[in-house]
Image (cartoon, helix red, strand yellow):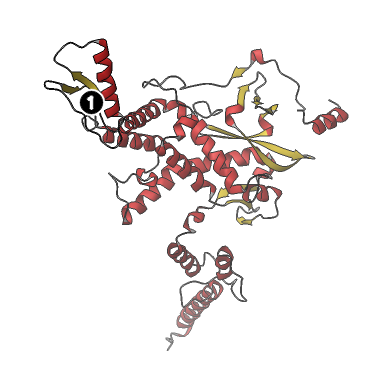
């Protein structure tokens, strides 16, 4: 392809790659889809109508999105330098990936799509070969397939946009996978749990819709004409629809037999609690984080340990997948040897001033950070002399401590040498 043709394709938004025949391509694997045992076919919108699904997806996506994403550089000696603010990719990842979203909004919607669809997509917006932004793409409109030459083709078909990209033009975040290429849809695989939850919500709604009045059989101990039967139906329906209670007058011998199971006998509340726990199990979220505290503590060290478990076993794998996907998709092979992407977990301590102060004090006492580095992290101005690293030995500098140790060692060596030569002991 000539340079002029490439320039024309760039101006018109067309791909430089030749068109492929789709008959020899492997389509996107649709696993786990189908009708649930309850007879409901869940989709994303129905799943989000369950408070437990909404709570889990929101908790995971918002927590990860509020952790600052930063870019670091590795030195030739293997050490890590400070955050590389000047790199063009830093602003895109940390501040604003596109003209419509802040970084928090962008990463929240990306992770929400992963938790619901198993995959999240963003277009790499390029100008003159330079990445200038990331455009969010709805996963419901994306169809992906692997071509015979090994590349992955992404076909996007929305009401206003129809376009085709290839794997080097798309940022693809995925959840747990069976092939390493496409993420599995949580909503599709947990369709039975979601279907039961929706059925329970519907059953509870029907109970309260009828004013908690069960259906049944009204017994009249004699035969009725059609006119008398219609009058009886009218009288019962009038009583049934009276939201203020009402009084039904019956004749001698008339009786009512309920055929609807009592909500208490059906364990409706227990079943709805089970649905909450089961959804939390699917997402790996402690139930108390979505407001369910019936069988778990929400106080003291118990909650702290659950928070730590949530970060370690639920968030950390998702964050690591995201970091590596961003490095692979947005950095060149040469840049990946020099730069790397990391989420800053200390963003979770922003609302906990006590713990944040304890961590900062420990870093200063142990010479991990200088006072000005701590002040910079807390958005405070530096001061003269604050760049010196100190340790706990009366808050002396590390350099003085090392120098003092060397002086002490020299004094001991000189005293031993003098004792060996003259036999005189030092005072």
Q: In this view, does 278 lie above or below 82?
A: above
Q: Which residue does the image show at 65% across and 12% down from the upper left?
A: 23
**Residue lying furthest right in this view?**
4
Q: Where is residue 111 in the image (x, y as percent from the top left)?
A: 53, 39
Q: Quadrant of residue 241?
A: top left
- Where 236 sits versus 222, above or below? below
Q: Which residue is drawn at 52% across and 64% down?
A: 368
Q: How many labels does the image show?
A: 1
Left/right of residue 234 with respect to residue 427 in the rendered view: left
User: Quick one: 353 or 388, which is closer to the camera?
Assistant: 353
Q: Nearer the viewer, residue 99 or 281?
A: 99
Q: Is residue 32 left or right of residue 132?
A: left
The 10 Å Cα crowd at callout 1, few under 14, some 14 to 19, many 20 or more, is few
The location of residue 69, given as percent across then percent down, is 58, 50
List the single residue furthest toward the bottom: 427
Residue with the mark numbered 1: 261
Q: Residue at x 31, y 55 (%)?
A: 299
Name the residue at the left extreme: 253
Q: Is mark 1 on a helix, strand or loop?
A: loop
Q: Residue at x 72, y 42 (%)?
A: 131
Quadrant containing the C terminus is: bottom left
Q: Is residue 25 left or right of residue 369?
A: right
Q: Quadrant of the N terminus?
A: top right
In the current view of this chain or complex, which residue is farthest to the front? 227
Query: Where is residue 29 shown, x and y percent of the image?
Result: 54, 21
| Figure check: 356 above or below 63 | below
Residue 330: x and y in percent read: 66, 40
Viewer-proximal residue among 70 and 302 = 302
């Amino acid at each position: 392809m000539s340079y002029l043709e490439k320039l024309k394709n760039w101006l018109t938004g067309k791909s430089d790659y030749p068109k492929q025949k789709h008959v020899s391509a492997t389509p996107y694997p649709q696993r786990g889809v189908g009708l649930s045992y309850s007879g409901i076919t869940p989709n994303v919108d129905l799943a989000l109508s369950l408070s437990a699904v909404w709570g889990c997806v929101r908790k995971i996506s918002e927590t990860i999105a509020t952790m600052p994403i930063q870019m670091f550089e590795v030195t030739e000696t293997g050490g890590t330098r400070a955050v590389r603010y000047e790199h063009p990719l830093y602003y895109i990842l940390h501040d604003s990936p596109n003209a419509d979203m802040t970084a928090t909004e962008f990463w929240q919607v990306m992770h929400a799509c992963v938790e619901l669809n198993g995959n999240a997509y963003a277009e790499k917006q390029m100008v003159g070969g330079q990445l200038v932004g990331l455009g969010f793409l709805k996963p419901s409109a994306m169809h992906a397939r692997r071509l015979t030459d090994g590349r992955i083709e992404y076909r996007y078909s929305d009401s206003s946009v129809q376009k085709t990209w290839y794997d080097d033009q798309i940022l693809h975040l995925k959840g747990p996978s069976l092939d390493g290429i496409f993420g599995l849809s949580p909503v599709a695989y947990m369709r039975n749990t979601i279907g039961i939850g929706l059925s329970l919500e519907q059953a509870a709604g029907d109970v309260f819709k009828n004013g908690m009045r069960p259906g049944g059989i009204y017994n009249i101990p004699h035969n009725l004409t059609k006119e008398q039967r219609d009058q009886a139906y009218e009288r019962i329906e009038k009583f049934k629809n009276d939201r203020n209670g009402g009084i039904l007058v019956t004749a001698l011998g008339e009786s009512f037999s309920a055929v609807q199971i009592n909500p208490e006998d059906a364990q409706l509340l227990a079943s709805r609690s089970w649905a909450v726990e089961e959804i939390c199990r699917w997402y790996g979220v402690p139930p108390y984080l979505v407001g369910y505290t019936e069988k778990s503590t929400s106080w003291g060290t118990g909650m702290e340990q659950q928070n730590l478990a949530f970060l370690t076993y639920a968030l950390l794998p998702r964050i690591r997948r995201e970091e590596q996907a961003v490095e692979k998709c947005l950095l060149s092979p040469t840049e990946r040897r020099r730069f790397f992407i990391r989420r800053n977990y200390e963003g979770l301590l922003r609302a906990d001033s006590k713990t944040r102060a304890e961590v900062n004090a420990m870093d200063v006492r142990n010479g991990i950070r200088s006072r000005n580095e701590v002040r910079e992290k807390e958005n405070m101005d530096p001061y003269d002399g604050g760049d010196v690293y100190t340790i706990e030995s009366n808050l002396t500098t590390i350099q003085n401590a090392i120098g003092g140790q060397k002086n002490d060692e020299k004094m001991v060596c000189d005293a031993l040498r003098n004792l060996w030569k003259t036999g005189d002991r030092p005072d």
